[in-house]
Amino acid sequence: MKLSKYLTSMPAYSPAPNTCKVRLNTNESPYDLPDYLKEEVIQKIREMPFNRYPNPRAVQLRDVAAEFFGVEPSMIMPGNGSGEWIKMLVSDLMEKGSKLLFLDPDFFIYRRQAGFAAMDMHLVSKDPDGFLTLERLLEILKEEKPDFFMFSNPCNPTGQGYTREEVKQIIAACGDGVVIVDEAYNDFFGESIIDYAVTTENVIVLRTCSKAIGLACARIGFAIANPQMIDLINHIRSPYSVSQTAQIIGEVVLKDKKYLKEITEKVIEEREITYKKLEELAAKYPEAMILKPSVSNFFFVRFADSEKICNGLKERSVAVRDFPRAPIPHTRITVGTPEENRALIEGLTEILAGK
């Protein structure tokens, strides 16, 4: 069989089952939907015809999402999570031979999909601390001259963010190359370029409902761009990829802006509180951990002995995500509820003190 060499050499992406009480390893929202929203969803699902295919263009969800993000419905298209859009845009948007550029570290799925699609992929390493200054990034883009550049802002996994004015400079440095800005975590940052992207020819913004919006179970993501680009990329989208159940959930929840604003502000507040406590630990144990500031809902931490730290937290029923074999080994810690964050800090304090 002439199977893909990249596929057969690539280990499967298999998130480990999580049995810990405190789950700070997947960057989900720590807040479940309130009962009144669940009841509204249940009522609408009762009225849903189960024998029919989903609306192929998710028209009602598209309308609600357009209002939520402040664009016209012709400028947005839902998908099965932003992950579906990542796969399609990396694999199908560009001609073979086009130069695709990614940064490292960044969301590893970008380059994984490029590898599966046998695209001409170029990977540029960031600085040893995992961050990259705007000036250096602009130099890289002008040197590399990519046909396609995809990056997350804020970055997963480092939590670094470029302001909207800086992103405009990044886009300009790419010339007529296609720029995909993955804003999965931008709700926690507030520096979106959606309003600018829809006025350009070559920029696509990706958004997800799996993080701040708290709908990881529903798998809803959006591509946002000018109407001509949306019409074009709709050609590569499976018409029934967003289930009718997911469409209903999205319609209900995205209408409740007040609730979504409140839970996002809670996470941001907890991020700042938890960062200060982690910063105190990093100052007390400088040889044991290095902490970077974050504008997302997680922290990028480098432990001298991450295995000891992560196992110690697991024994205390706290799960975090360790990447010991990454080019820059690190541990990613999600911001949780106040109670979950206290459990994290208490556990880390004990482990670092050798208790």
Image (cartoon, rainbow, N blue to C red):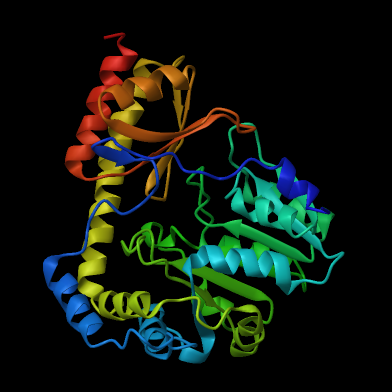
Q: Image quadrant for the C terminus?
A: top left
In the rendering, at what x and y percent does residue 291 appear? Answer: 44, 30
Q: Is 272 on the left-hand or right-hand side of 127?
A: left
Q: Nearer the viewer, residue 9 or 202?
A: 9
The residue under the point 30% across, 34% down is 276
Q: Nearer the viewer, residue 324 or 277?
A: 324
Q: Please identify the residue farthest to the right as the structure is shown.
A: 97
In the rendering, at what x and y percent does residue 8 appear? Answer: 73, 45
Give above or below for 67 relative to 285.
Answer: below
Q: How many marks?
A: 0
Which quadrant would residue 273 be assigned to in this image? Answer: top left
Give above or below for 242 relative to 18.
Answer: below
In the rendering, at what x and y percent does residue 25 appear? Answer: 38, 41
Q: Is 24 on the left-hand or right-hand side of 21?
A: right
Q: Is 67 on the left-hand or right-hand side of 35?
A: right
The residue under the point 65% across, 60% down is 150
Q: Nearer the viewer, residue 330 or 32?
A: 32
In the rendering, at what x and y percent does residue 43 appear? Answer: 17, 81
Give above or below for 260 relative to 10.
Answer: below
Which quadrant would residue 316 be assigned to in this image? Answer: top left
